[in-house]
Amino acid sequence: QQQVKQSPQSLIVQKGGISIINCAYENTAFDYFPWYQQFPGKGPALLIAIRPDVSEKKEGRFTISFNKSAKQFSLHIMDSQPGDSATYFCAASMRRNTPLVFGKGTRLSVIA
Amino acid sequence: SAVISQKPSRDICQRGTSLTIQCQVDSQVTMMFWYRQQPGQSLTLIATANQGSEATYESGFVIDKFPISRPNLTFSTLTVSNMSPEDSSIYLCSVGTASYEQYFGPGTRLTVT
């Protein structure tokens, strides 16, 4: 049973455009929702994260939107750049120091 | 944040042999996690390693195949035993923090021939 569903699998965005990746979860015990960015040959890097007590969090060009009632959260990348081309994973966990459950990933390509 | 290093960064091993992967953190952490990432796939949890206790394994992973050590608060090892080509993957360690964040090492890329 996949606990975190991520879409789309792949995404092509023009430079300067907005990239949007969506995730949905099933387990209402989840209370931490991070996004990771992974470049080929590298480990996943924590990009931005949110807890359910807020509906949105913004850090630079990256924004998480969180809808607790719909059990959905999304990553928006504003002014997308070719350097943003990577695989993005959403994840969820239940408490501090517990394992993450990952979505299947989205391969983003930003083209000039 | 935490800085995590893994050794080796990559290896090519023969079927039937074993490889031990080391994970070193630059600060003391309670929980360390080992994940596997098959080519082009997402991350799957192998086990959780809490210092001072036995590792907890996820369904489909067993201690005889993936023994883990956690001798102190900054170090852990994962051994992949009696390897087969199906074990070819990226093996990642990560650490938990008191503030929810989890950080990953650079990974160990294992190819079994």
Image (cartoon, grey):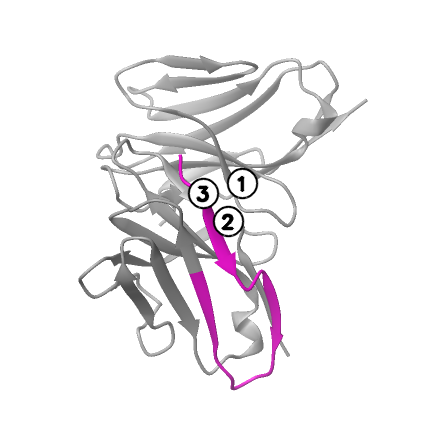
Local SS, label 2: loop
Local SS, label 1: loop
The numbered disc on residue B3 is 3
Q: Quadrant of residue A90?
A: top left
The numbered disc on residue A105 is 1
Mark 1 vs mark 2, CA separation in Å: 6 Å
Q: Position of residue B55 (x, y in %)?
A: 25, 63
Mark 3 vs mark 2, CA separation in Å: 22 Å
Q: Amino acid at mark 1?
A: Gly
Tell me the residue at 60%/57% (across/down). Answer: B39
Q: Position of residue B17 (x, y in %)?
A: 51, 84
Provide the residue span drawn in magenta. Answer: B1-22
Tell me the residue at 81%/22% (across/down). Answer: A112
Residue, disc 2: B42
Most extreme residue toward the front, as rendered? B26
Q: Position of residue B91 (x, y in %)?
A: 49, 60
